[in-house]
Every structure is written in C-alpha cells, then in structure tokens.
Image (cartoon, rainbow, N blue to C red):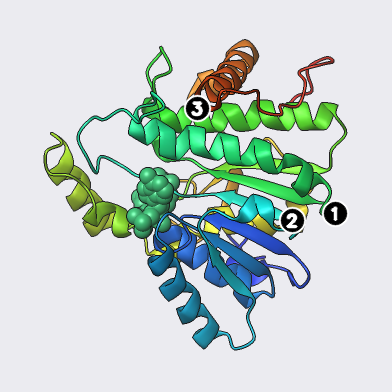
Amino acid sequence: MGLLGWTRRDVPSLAGKVALVTGANSGIGFELTRQLVEHGAEVVMVGRDKQLLDWAARDLEEEFPGARVESTAREILSTKLPINILVNNAGRFVDAPFCVTPDGFEQTLASNYFGHALLTLMLLDRIAASGPGARIVNVSSPAEQYATADLDDITLFQIMFNHELHRRLRLEGRDIDCFAVHPGMVATGLSNKVSFCHPSAVAIYAAMRLSGQSPLQGAQSALFAATAPQLRGKGGAYIGPLYATNTFHAHERYPVNRAAYDYETCVKLFNRTAAELARALGHDVPVPPAVGARVPV
Ligand SMILES: NC(=O)c1ccc[n+]([C@@H]2O[C@H](COP(=O)([O-])OP(=O)(O)OC[C@H]3O[C@@H](n4cnc5c(N)ncnc54)[C@H](OP(=O)(O)O)[C@@H]3O)[C@@H](O)[C@H]2O)c1
C-alpha cells in the first residue's frame, strides 16, 4: 500500500479467477483486462466488434505468453465458465445525435445502463455459484455530481442501481460485493468518438485530451474495486480518485449527488429498470427480491 493509498502494485494473485470485462477492446477496459491478466486471471473480453476484440486479445497473448484471454461478443450465457469478477465498463459518450433503439431506449441509456443491468441480472446465479468473494463493478463517472433533480443522468442511475442490487444480494445472503466506480477524466478513444454535432463537443474533446489521465491510470478504480482484499464485504461503496482529473490512487469515496443515497428512489429505479427490461424482452428477468429491512450500504 502506497503512502497515498492503494496502487496497482497491491493487486493480489488472481490465479484461478475468471473475470468478464465489457468494452474490453480499448481504453479503460483494455488496460483493466491487461492488469487482470498480468496478475493471473483468465479474462473473457466482451465487446460489440469481434475483430477489435480479437486484435486486443492477440496483443495481450503476445505480451503475456500463456495468458488465458478469450474474446467473445455474445456467447457468454451458453458457456459454463465461472465468473468471479464482472466489470460493466462499455460505454459511449456524445458520439452521435439523439436516437432511440428499436426496443424504445435512448441509445446511450441502452448501452451504458440497461444493457449492463440485463447482463448483470442474467449472470447473477453464475457469479454467485462461482465461489466466495465475487465482485461486480459498475463503471460510472464523476458526472454523477451534475445529475439533475429529476434523475435524468445515466451515471447516477449506475450508482443507484449498484446500491440497490448490493442491498438485495446481501438480504439474500449472497457473497457478492457490488461496487460503482468512477475513473476520473481519462484520455481514451471515447474522446476520438465525440460527435462534433454536440454543442459541448469541442470543450469535451479538449478537456479529455489535454487533462485526461492515461488509460492505465483510468483503470485503477475498477482494478481496486475488482481485486482489493480489503474491500471484501464493503460492497455498495463508491470508488474513485479523489479528484476528477488525478490520480494514481483509488479510494473509497462518496457520490457527490445525494440522490445516490435515497433508498426509496434507488428501489424505484431498480424496479422500473426490471420492468423496462421485461417490456423490451417480452418476459420477466430474474431479479433478487427486495425483502427484509434495509441494510446500510
Ligand atoms: N474516458 C473518460 O474520461 C471517462 C470518464 C468517466 C467515465 N468513463 C466511462 O468509462 C468507460 C470506458 O470508456 P473509455 O474511456 O475506456 O472509452 P473507449 O476507449 O471508447 O472504450 C469504450 C468501450 O465501450 C464500447 N462501446 C461503446 N459504445 C458501445 C455500445 N453502444 N455497445 C457496446 N459497446 C460499446 C467500445 O466499443 P468500440 O471500441 O467498438 O467502440 C469500447 O470497447 C465508459 O463506460 C465511459 O462512460 C470514461
């Protein structure tokens, strides 16, 4: 442990662990995958472009001969692999004009929030059966602090869904810790994809390129949440660097937005999410029940 807190040198051996990382072909997801592989984990790399995933997996196999890296776009549910660590990282950001998916979701909400909520709920039993100390990590953003009172912000949804999921899993007695993390501002491919149709595009592009951390630094929060032994049993916590644009060190911290702690609103969001997923799929999704008294997160 460094003077300023945990660093990636503190990651324990991950031999025998299987991690699944979404958006693993680039940026934070790729660097996180690299760190997990370096410490001995087998990583299932998930993404929407099979060729990009294959290239990224090949790079890692060259860097770490003997590494167990699999790139897959959609066959996860049909495999029997255990999943000890799930990292919901894939995301887009002002990269296209407003658009609604055929399922009726705004496209960024669909990819950054609903897609991960569904993946998580579908994998819960598998994760729970994969052994003690499993982790679910939801990559959010420091933008949670700017979310408006009517809760229209995806990054805040991610934190609130994480709180409620963690609370329900504890009530069920499942040994899974769920964390929301923010990476700080990071100079990744996200900035290159910004659509200049967006009114804030130039400012966003300049800020990310000029003051963003490296993807390696940006991956630290998720790596800490996914692996640090001292976080066992501390699910529900929010992890990130202390300030948006620095640092090499990840910390437990608190969302700035008070709505993230509002129990009733977290429950409402969780139930509405499950209902929207059921509407889109045409059938219910498995959801841990909201029974029992509230457990503080
Ligand atoms: N960079 C930052 O400053 C920053 C700050 C706060 C939060 N974050 C969050 O960190 C996460 C990783 O972003 P990054 O900075 O590493 O950016 P990145 O390099 O662009 O990586 C994003 C990953 O998500 C995938 N992705 C994008 N849109 C998708 C969609 N509609 N469906 C499925 N996959 C999709 C990308 O796939 P393709 O390669 O095929 O596009 C890529 O694998 C995102 O959730 C982002 O919101 C980033």
Note whether 126 is above or below 14 in the view shown.
above
Note whether 179 is above or below 259 in the view shown.
below
Identified by mark 2, the residue type is Asn
Q: Quadrant of residue 92?
A: top left
- For label 2, the residue is 84
Q: Of label 2 and label 1, which has the lower sequence position?
A: 2
Cβ–Cβ under 8 Å for marks 2 and 1: yes
- In the image, taking residue 216 as reference, residue 132 lies left or right, namely right
Q: Of label 2 and label 3, which has the lower sequence position?
A: 2
- For label 3, the residue is 157
Identified by mark 1, the residue type is Gly
Identified by mark 3, the residue type is Phe
Note whether 119 is above or below 2 in the view shown.
above
- For label 1, the residue is 131
Mark 2 or 3: the one toward you: 2
In front here: 117 or 211? 117
In front here: 69 or 278? 278
Q: Which quadrant, please, contains the C terminus?
A: top right
Instruction: Identify the secondary structure beneath mark 2.
Output: loop
Q: Is residue 255 visible?
A: no
Residue 82, percent from left and from top: 76, 58
Residue 95, percent from left and from top: 24, 44
